[in-house]
Image (tube, grey):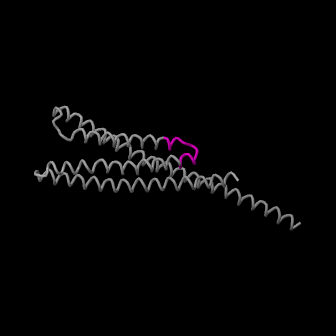
Amino acid sequence: MELEELQKAWKELNERVSQNELVHQQQIIEMLSRQKESCLQRMLRMDKIASIFMLGVTILMFVDFIHLNGKLVFWPAIFGLLLYALTVNFAGVILLTKIKKETNLEMQIKNILRYKMLINWSYIIGYLLVTPFICIFLYTYRHLWWLMITMFGLVLAGVLTDYFLFHHVSDRIKELTRVNKELMELKEKHKE
């Protein structure tokens, strides 16, 4: 009799433990999903703000160009750089939106890696495009010391901002990749 009671009690305990493990795994999956969504929201918000800012600067540059009757020597280069940055930023917003809507975790990881590649190449190409422009600008206006100081300040501010933004985005990309991989592992274990 005692053996049967022990077996029954053991079976009940085993069922409770397995049920608690399933609940615990489900809670971890929900927590990771929320973490992924909040990370995506932050990245999307940052990209949208940057897009709106660059669109505003581009519109202001266009208005200045019309107001100055095209007399600004470097206007086409500045406008081209702003359009490049705006295009890359909109592509980033589209990719982040695609990542957010995607339900397949493997496709999400692939899209995250595409976003990472877009960010890396946009910085490389952007700096390659901006460097000659800055050098020519500084050479052309070298006799205006106040303009040189202003330009150095703007370049320094831009580089520092890019540095912090790049590392912020890189950290978010790593976090998204890690969370998606953990979610894939947990969901595979959960299916078994």
- Residue 141 in percent (x, y) is at 14, 49
- Residue 100 in percent (x, y) is at 50, 43
| Frontmost residue, 25 versus 132 | 132
The range drawn in magenta is 98-109
User: What residue lies at 27% left-to-right and 38% top-to-bottom?
Assistant: 58
The image quadrant of residue 71 is: top left
- Residue 34 in percent (x, y) is at 52, 50
| Frontmost residue, 135 versus 108 | 135
Q: Does the magenta stretch include residue 69?
A: no
Left or right, 112 with reference to 19: left
User: What residue lies at 36% left-to-right and 51% top-to-bottom?
Assistant: 124
User: What residue lies at 33% left-to-right and 41% top-to-bottom?
Assistant: 84
Left or right, 8 with reference to 105: right
Q: Residue furthest right?
A: 1
| Frontmost residue, 122 versus 149 | 122
Left or right, 79 with reference to 142: right
Q: Residue furthest left?
A: 143
User: What residue lies at 16% left-to-right and 53% top-to-bottom?
Assistant: 148
Above-or-below relation of 2 to 117: below
| Frontmost residue, 49 versus 91 | 91
Q: Residue furthest bottom?
A: 2
Decide whether the magenta segment is chiefly helix, strand or loop: helix
Q: Is residue 107 magenta?
A: yes
